[in-house]
Amino acid sequence: MKGAAPLPDHLSLELRRGAVILAVLSQLREEAYGYSLKKSIADAGLDIDEGTLYPLLRRLESQGCLDSTWRVEDGRPRRYYVLNASGRSALKAMAAEWELLSKAIGRMLK
Amino acid sequence: MTTHDQAADLIERYLHQVGENLPNRQREDVCRELRTLIEDSVRDRTEAGDVRGATLAADVLHGFGPPEQVAARYAGERYLIGPGLYPYFIVISQVIVIGLVALFGVFLAIHLFRESPRMFSSEMFEILWGWSGSLVKFVFINLGLLVAVLAAVERLQSGKPDTRDDWDPLKLPEVPKQKDLDRISNGSVVFEGYLILALFLLVNFATDWFGVIWFQKGELRSSHFTDFGLYLPLVMLNIWWGLAMALKIALLRVGRWNRELRWAEFALGLFGAFILYQVIEGSSGYLLTMIAKLILLATGIEAAVRFYRLCTRYAYW
């Protein structure tokens, strides 16, 4: 928005919270480990700091949306995450909600 | 130490600090994953041409954030007293603080009346200073006990499944025509639990605090209860308090009285009456024995009413 003041940290955090979860779930339709996930999200234009992203993966796993497994590739052990059935349906529902929100907020901001 | 060693040492120190702030069951697993993530990040930037060693590692770690914050995010939100119990904490704290201030005010007035110090004299300030210190000590001890009780309740309730989505408005019970005797007030139950714990601690660890104060020929005198020949069967009392506390916790978990809990309450009442009988048998003082006999009589009547209600299901279910 033209001439908009920088967004205070706490508001930015509130605004991004749900979006970050959606971004992570969307990128885990294919298996990925923490660092590769961070890069793929950054490549798509969303920067999430490590201190937020990595604990979020654990939380989503404990909530039953993700499965994880340790594997050694290129001589390095890594924990790989991927959506499970529950995560896929959560992603579908969140994506639909996002569409609704995005349209509604778009209309209100006009 | 080479720059590589310095970087490795820095990462090691960071992981140690994160681990220190994590629960035991998470520590090894989280630190193991965190190590691979940090090393991936350092390696990627080194391969991109950044060869600053320890400085690079420090940059990467800075991106992860302070160890305490990272650990807190992994551990999730933990409350000593959560939002659900916080209102009870506020209300009961106010009762405790106001009650203690009032009690101390009365006793201080009696003490000043008896000592009659000169107004604004050093003796008067000494008395006020000493009593204020005691009041602050008592307030903190009692608030500490309250926090301990509520923290235990919080921990017990944290495992309860969230049923907010399962409830059906159509299944809401009708407004009872008479008072719902099975309904509980969480605040009252928590307060009773706090009193049980306070009594347990006082009787076990501070019996010298119990006594009476009276005037005799213009003199303020005090005596401990034990001076009046009071017998306290401590083992049985502790068992009773333990069972009473378990009943309160069960009541909080279930959310209202049911048949089983009512029977447990009845059995606890009988056990209490038996303990009271032991107190009467073992005590030698006339006054205290009379008081205990009156309490036993009241307990007996209450138990009979409870038994009648349990047998006839009157007003309970």
Image: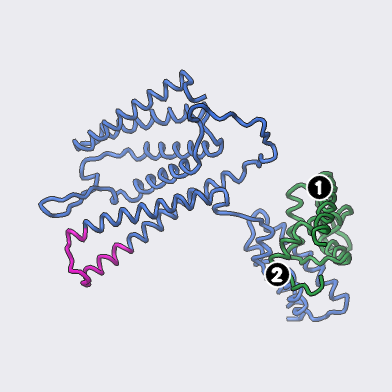
Chain colours: A green, B blue
Extreme residue toward the front, this view: A110
Q: Disc 1 designates what residue?
A: A90
Q: Is residue A69 left or right of residue B306?
A: right
Does B267 appear above or below A64?
above
Q: Does B112 lie within the magenta span?
A: yes
Residue visible at 83% across and 57% down in the picture = A107
* Residue B156 % position (x, y): 56, 44
Name the amino acid type tagged 1. Answer: Ala
- Tell me the tag on residue B303: none
Q: Kindly indicate the quadrant of the structure image that contains residue B32.
A: bottom right
Residue A70 appears anywhere in the view: no
Residue visible at 26% across and 31% down in the picture = B293
Query: Main structural element of the magenta stretch: helix, strand or loop?
Result: helix
Q: Disc 2 designates what residue?
A: A8
Q: Quadrant of the N terminus of chain B?
A: bottom right
Closer to us: mark 2 or mark 1?
A: 2
From mark 2 to mark 1, how far is it between C-alphas?
A: 30 Å
Extreme residue toward the left, this view: B217
Name the amino acid type tagged 2. Answer: Pro
Q: Secondary structure at mark 1?
A: helix
Q: Is residue B106 left or right of residue B158?
A: left
Which range of residues does the magenta coloring cover?
A: B111-132
Host chain of mark 2: A
Q: Is residue B265 left or right of residue B111?
A: right
Residue A26 appears anywhere in the view: yes
Residue visible at 25% across and 58% down in the picture = B108
* Residue B110 % position (x, y): 21, 56
Does B87 appear above or below A10?
above
Host chain of mark 1: A
